[in-house]
Amino acid sequence: TEAARKLARQRRALAGERDTAQPASDAVPPVDVVLCHEQLADMSALHLLQLLRSYPRLLDLPVLVVSSAATREAVLSSVGAGCSGFLGRPYTVDALDGQLLRARRALATRTARTVAEGTQMLSDEEFDQALERFANAAIEAADEAEAHFLEGTAHLLREQWDAAITAFNRTLRYNALHAEACLGLADAWRGKGDLDKSREFRSRAGEIYARARQWRHAQNIFAELLADSPPDTPNPLLAEAARLLRDGRIDDAAAALLAGRELT
């Protein structure tokens, strides 16, 4: 847990955000990639992955899982937790280089630049231009996320693990960009004075995070929305839990239920 917090603080510092609560002795040297064994002293690699991906600044931090059992189940579990690559032990330097290259390529997206442009326009209060940028980014991110998900599923069926991990990692990244774009649209509409539109896109961002199992992000968004809603407004996370339960995804349904209970 402390490692995840330090990495998140480092990413905030790299983004130019000051952290006055961080003592100088707690500074972390720049980290470009995390190489993680399947079992750590206090938790598994999957648990650490889930923890890291719960921090917005760490969604795009490449994390490679090293395992002595490169089975289908191990790969699928790592993919589901958001790994950027999977290495079976023993591995060669060439294998490591290949995984690092795939992780880097998965993060290089035009959509990310569009979202960044929209964010700058928001700070400059250029709301109409920001709406255009975020709308384009939302459409592109949704299309790309679906395409990479289908690609990853096809690779899994062929047991092409490396290609599947790359595709699902891109799915994760584009889902995050889609949610960021929707939040940008929400802020732009609020800047233009249309609060209904703002709530619509903020709710959509929460739904995207929930579908991507980013429960903390979804929870924060829905908590803000429910705070300004009538008391009888349905809890979106409980509805998501019911949907997951109908689909037979018991573990995900339980996670959604726990996150939803904290809202009500």
Image: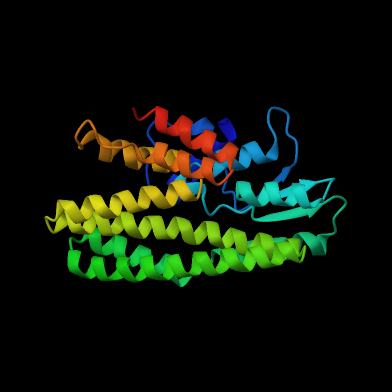
Horizontal and vertical percent position of residue 41: 73, 29
Left-right relation of 15 to 184 = right
- The answer to which of 210 and 42 lies nearer the viewer is 210
| Quadrant the C terminus occupies | top left
* Residue 252 location, quadrant: top right
Can residue 27 be seen from the camera position used here?
A: no
| Quadrant the N terminus occupies | top right
Left-right relation of 199 to 43 = left
Please give the name of the residue rendered at 46% of the width and 70% of the height, measured from the top-left corner: 143
- The answer to which of 55 and 9 lies nearer the viewer is 55
Horizontal and vertical percent position of residue 76: 70, 51
* In the depicted structure, whether residue 160 falls above or below residue 20: below
Left-right relation of 159 to 21 = right
Can residue 58 be seen from the camera position used here?
A: yes
Please give the name of the residue rendered at 38% of the width and 69% of the height, measured from the top-left corner: 139
* Residue 105 location, quadrant: bottom right
Horizontal and vertical percent position of residue 7: 54, 41
Instruction: Indicate how the structure is coloured in the image.
Output: rainbow
Please give the name of the residue rendered at 55% of the width and 47% of the height, measured from the top-left corner: 247
- The answer to which of 162 and 233 lies nearer the viewer is 233
Q: Which residue reaches farthest front?
A: 246
* In the depicted structure, whether residue 230 falls above or below residue 32: above
